[in-house]
Every structure is written in C-alpha cells, then in structure tokens.
Amino acid sequence: MGLLALGTALDWPEAKKQAHLVRSWGIKQLLEIWNKAKGKERDAMLWGDEVEYLVVTYSKDDPKVLLSLRQADILKALENDTALSKAGCAPPLPDGSNSHTSQPPPVFHPEFGRFMLEATPGKPWGIEFKELLEVEPNMRLRRCIAKAHMLSNEYPITLTTFPRLGSPGVFTDPYYPVSGPKLRSQFVPDEIANPHIRFPTLAANIRSRRGRKVQVNVPVFKDEKTPWPWKDPTVNYDLHNWPEDDDVRNGAAPENFIHMDAMAFGMGSCCLQITFQAKNLTEGRQMYDQLSPLGPILLALTAATPVYKGFLADTDVRWNQISKAVDDRTPEELGEKPLVNDRWRIPKSRYASNSTYISEDPRLRPEYLDPDLVIDESIKQQLLDGGMDDRLATHFAHLFIRDPIVIFSEDLKELDLSKTDHFENIQSTNWQHMRFKPPPADNSIGWRVEFRPMEIQITDFENAAFAVFIVLITRVILSFDLNFYIPIKKVDENMETAHARDAVLTRKFYFRRNLFPTARPSRSGSSTPVASRPPTPTGPVEDEYRLMSVNEIINGTAYAKATSSSPPSSSSSSSSSPPLKRRKTSSSEVEDNEEEDEEFPGLIPLVESYLDSVNVDVATRCQLATYLDLIRKRASGELWTAARWIRHFVARHPEYKRDSVVGEGITRDLVAAVVRIGECEVNGRGFRGVCGAGEGEDGEEGVEGVERLLGGFR
Ligand code: ADP
Ligand code: MG
Ligand code: MG
Ligand code: MG
Ligand code: MG
Ligand code: MG
C-alpha cells in the first residue's frame, strides 16, 4: 500500500464536507502530472510483482493454527535488518549460480490485515528473458527472509484467505474480543486491521457512508448433509452494542449464504499483482485495454478461495467478496431509495472490474464502451480544458465519481502541486481489475499499468509461473499487435462467470474470435506496426466474439478438443468434489454448439510462437516451458486449481462431516499441508516424491493430492 503519512484522519461526516475539495485538488494534481508526463518517451520496459502473505502460527504439536497479528513487529524487524540475505535465504538460480546481484534486498510492505504482509522485488524487473528466471528464486528469497524475521511458530503462507477468519472462538494470536467501535463487526475484532489510523478509518468511513455495515454474503456450498435451507449458525441476532447490530435483524444475512460484515473479510485476502511500465502513454493505454479482457480468465485460472468463516463456499474466488467488503454506496446510489442527496445511481462497488477502455486505438469501436458509464461531467470538462483527450478524461471522470474515504486534515491547508496525494487518494481507492498509474509527481518513472485480478497461489513456483505468463502475454500483445477487444460489459459478465465453482472447467467466457490485425503472424513472428493496420471492419460487434472455455482460450481449440474429452476424475468420494459433469443451466456453461469447430489459436501457442521468434537460450526456454506447462494443465483440467485442491483436502479429512463445515482440525491440517508444501519447495526435493501422498523419504507424511495441484515438475 505504499508509504503511509501520519496525521489526523477525519471521521465521515467531516470527511464528506471536504470531499469536493479533495477531488478538485486531485484533478489539479492530475493535470499537473499529465502536462509534465504526457509526452514522455522511451521509458524502459520494466515490470514488478507483488506477493501477499497471511502470517499464521503453526507448530507440529499444536492442535490449533491462528492468525498472527504481529505485522508491525515483523515489519520493524525486517526494516532494522541490514543483512537481509541471511544464510540459507538465497537458493541457487536454475542455472546453478547463486547470484541475486541484479536485485537489491526485497521490500516488505504493510497491508490491510494485521495478519498480512506484502513483498515486492527490491527493484523492478527488466526486459531480459534471463530475468524471468530470477523471479521464482526471488519470491522464495522473500518468503525465506520474511520467515527469518518471525517467531519459530510463525509462517508466511500464500493462501488467499484464512479459512476460519471470523469463526466463533479464537482465531487470532493474541485474542481480542469482537465488536469494536471501528468495524462494529460481530465476527472480527477491530484489532484485525492494521492499526495505522488510515486502515480503521477506511473501514469505519465506508461503513458510515453506507449507513450500515458492509454485507459480504457468499453462497454456501450445499453438501450431502448440509441442512437446507441453510442458516448461517454463527450469526448472532441478539446483539445490541451498536446501531449496526440491527443489520442482521433487517435481513443482512439471507438464507443459504455465509454472512460476513466487515472490510477484513475482503481486504484480508491475498492476491498476486503485476505492474508494467510502458514506453509511453500510448503504449500504456494499449496495454491497459488489451489486458483488460484477460482479467476474468486469469481470475478463473488462479481460483484459490473456496472457504469463508469456517464454511465451504459455492464459489471459488475472492473477487466479489472484496467488492462487497469495501462497497461504500449509499441506499440512494444503490437504487434502493430515490435520489435525493446523492448525485448518481452507481452500478458497481469501487472495487470491481474496470468499466471503460482508455486507448485511442482505432480498433476500439464505440460499441465496446458502456453507454451508461457514470462520470462526473464537470470533472471531465476540467480535464478537457486542461488539455486531456476525451477518452482518458472520461476514465478519470469515472474514477472521480467516488468520494475520498480517508482525509487527513493536515493535507487540506494548501494545494501542493508538487505532490499527487489528493489524486492518489481517489485513484488508489478505486480498486479495479486494471489500474492505470500515471508517473509520480517528480515524473521520475513512466506510465504504468497494473494487472490485479489474480489470486495468490500456494507455492512460489505457481506465483512465478503466473507472473511470467502475464509478462509474456504482454510482450506477445505488443509484438503481434493483438486485439482482444470485446464489449466492456462482456468483461463484467465474464468476471461473474469466473466465480463459479470450477469455472475453469465448467464455464465459458466471452472472448474475441480473431486477435489478429490481418493474417496471422508466421512462426517467425512478424508484427504489424500500428500505422500499417488495415481499416477496422465494421460488421456487427456480436460477430466478433463468442463463448469459449478457458482451455480453448489458453491452449487453443485444437488442444482443447484433444483434451476436453477426458475431464479430470476426482479421486474423492465426497460430493464436495463432484465429478465434473457437464450440466447445462446457463448460457455461460460449457455446452456443445456449432461454434466449437471454429479455430482459435490459444494464448500459450501464441506465447510459444513469440518465443520462437526471439532469441531465448535453451536453459531459459526450458524453465519457461515448466511455467507454461503448469498453466496449460490448469486450463485443461489435468492439474487442479488451488480451490479444487482445498475442496478435495477438506472432503478427504476425517473430521469433515459433509455438512460444509471447515472446523479447527481441518483448518489446522490444511495449514500444516501448506507449510509442508513450502518446505518441500525450499528443499527442492520434489513435490511428488517427498510431498506426495503417503510417507515421504524423510519419514514425514506427504501431502494429500499435491501432485494434482502441481504435477511432477520438481
Ligand atoms: P502498489 O501497491 O501501489 O500497486 P507497489 O509499490 O507495491 O505498488 O509496487 C508495485 C510493483 O511495481 C512492484 O513490484 C514494483 O517493483 C513495481 N515497480 C516499481 N517501479 C516500477 C516501474 N517503474 N515500472 C514497472 N514496475 C515498477
Ligand atoms: Mg497489496
Ligand atoms: Mg503494493
Ligand atoms: Mg497496493
Ligand atoms: Mg499493487
Ligand atoms: Mg476451481
């Protein structure tokens, strides 16, 4: 979350009064940087990843695992340690060398949850292919350094969510009682959030602006013995500490949904983000648009979030829960009451898939845009008057329909145009699946684009694979001048589709049929410069895209055809990992149709032809192949998503009663398995041999089903 200034944070009624000022100063700061940076050219093609961790307590002979709330102490220890590359924390690179010389020590950041950490590389990665091989060892180095600054029973793990966050009983170390003044949650204490004033204020002001607590309801997974209709047994209808305790009496907790009521249930989730620097503004806008339709596909492919508050959910990803956990819209904005005090009905939360495209690419047909996009017309006019073009002005005028949530009174004394703090206040609380990042006030770096939908994966191998995949896709987009445009509303629909259990195997996504400007590039990878593009065809937009499975999108139709006849069989006997049947209940589910015969090349084959067209040495190519292989097999179903692996783990656990309840014992063993997988990864002894099911060679138990998650690469 970047550096956090200290100051006096305004409560909502006061902040609301200053919202207009902050927006107007924010726009002035944006125009200042726009005028400074719009002509920037030849910035280097840099990129960087962000990995988020949960910190848990775990030890072999402790029957309980907890969230450790020692974030501040751990960060302090990391900050004060100058010799970060402690012995044992620098695993050799794949080529056998042990040099991390291109990288300064990694950087650790606080996050919303007091049980979270974020780590980034010490400096962004460059354009060299060899650097792609440094990513995975660097991620392991970060994890190792983090662990080295924790207590012996604390571990940084990369599950997206802690399965029993908000469950009755003790789930944090130390324990705090629930129902504090900031969150007013009946499930989590205020101490769950980072204590820096920004975070509790963010949570409290979102609640206050909404006029009630956030309502994070996720459908519960109906298993054989799940009582039905299901009533969340952890909801307390008899609390009378805060006015907000009425929420559940007013219907906040519907039947068949796991009910959660605080920002921590969303912002306490971990993700994997990738930021790219473009060579100039035009390229940045192109990258933003072209990566946008890939968001939901990568969300489905990285699915890792099947458990909330001690129950199996009927969805596989975190996205909508975060969206609801920070949804500050008022009843008027939500359309529940007539518009009287507020300015607009707003269709989406401030955490949502992005709502518009920003490039001036002639291939962007007006039909792809949302005709109902809500924007602040006066802000748009200011931006136009300041010299910004219509399309980008529209984007920012859309972001600026939101109020700033956290305002420090010290920042309101005078407008400082050598800063971007007011602009960033609005920008950084618009959590969309893509973010367009202007250069900082000093204009020291270029225009950047952030890809934000991916779920964090259990191992650094997987996290590196997905990071590298997105990097390669971006290079393919630029070098082949690919066109992924579909109507932005279809991207929204795809985002919903990505939530379904096993969406990667059972659903179809809207995707563009022809990615190429003219003829397809040959294997030698000739690219089409923008200037030589043929005029854009203008047939019906609906003919430009169709429904495809993730397998077809990632691997191509030929590969999908050859692999989809044998969907992966579940070795579980439980109905919580049912065999993947082809039901037909909605238009987005996999079904046979006449379009199935239409050829689509697939993203991985495109990456491969790109790699064929550039000079990559054999060792690098081999390592990249292991990453592409993981993704290929996840898309085809040969390997499982983390979500599916966790469901399988729960279903096979002796304490699981087929009633959707993920109890303390199951949670403890799941975390133990994740820690064990991490040990196997660091020791490099192979996930299959040592960590596979059955007893490993070191006498330790293996991990159930790990080979279905990771394959036999290591
Ligand atoms: P935020 O939390 O706002 O997304 P972070 O400071 O955590 O931003 O960094 C995001 C990523 O961007 C990090 O991996 C960092 O290394 C990377 N990064 C920093 N500078 C650049 C740059 N000029 N170009 C591309 N990536 C960069
Ligand atoms: Mg983060
Ligand atoms: Mg960050
Ligand atoms: Mg951030
Ligand atoms: Mg980020
Ligand atoms: Mg799944």
Image (cartoon, rainbow, N blue to C red):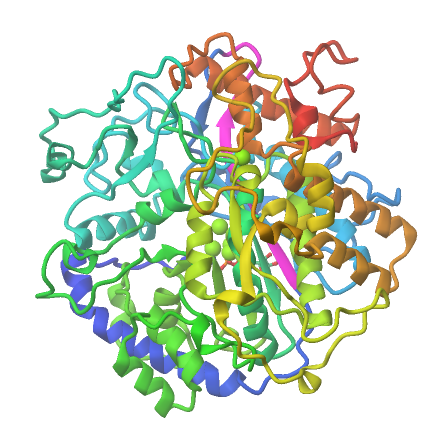
- Write the residue at 9% across / 61% down: 338
- Write the residue at 45% across / 71% down: 368
- The picture quadrant for ligand 6 comes to top right
- Asked if residue 699 is positioned above or below residue 107 in the image, the reply reads above
Q: Is residue 49 magenta?
A: yes
The residue stretch that appears in magenta: 47-62
**Nearest the eye: 600 or 272:** 600
Residue 21 pos. (x, y %)? 23, 75
Q: Is residue 564 magenta?
A: no
- Write the residue at 55% across / 17% down: 59
- Write the residue at 39% across / 19% down: 660
Q: Is residue 106 visible?
A: no
Q: Is residue 474 visible?
A: yes
Q: Main secondary structure of the magenta part?
A: strand
Residue 159 pos. (x, y %)? 53, 34
Would you say 314 lies left or right of 80 here?
left
Tell me where residue 449 sits by quadrant: bottom right
Would you say 553 lies left or right of 431 here?
right
Q: Quadrant of the C terminus?
A: top right
**Nearest the eye: 689 or 609:** 609
Residue 230 pos. (x, y %)? 27, 22
Tell me where residue 696 sits by quadrant: top right
**Nearest the eye: 13 or 221:** 221
- Asked if residue 180 is positioned above or below residue 41 in the image, the reply reads above
Would you say 447 lies left or right of 234 here?
right
Q: For the view shown, which residue lies furthest in the right direction?
A: 618
- Asked if residue 676 is positioned above or below residue 329 in the image, the reply reads above
Residue 238 pos. (x, y %)? 11, 24
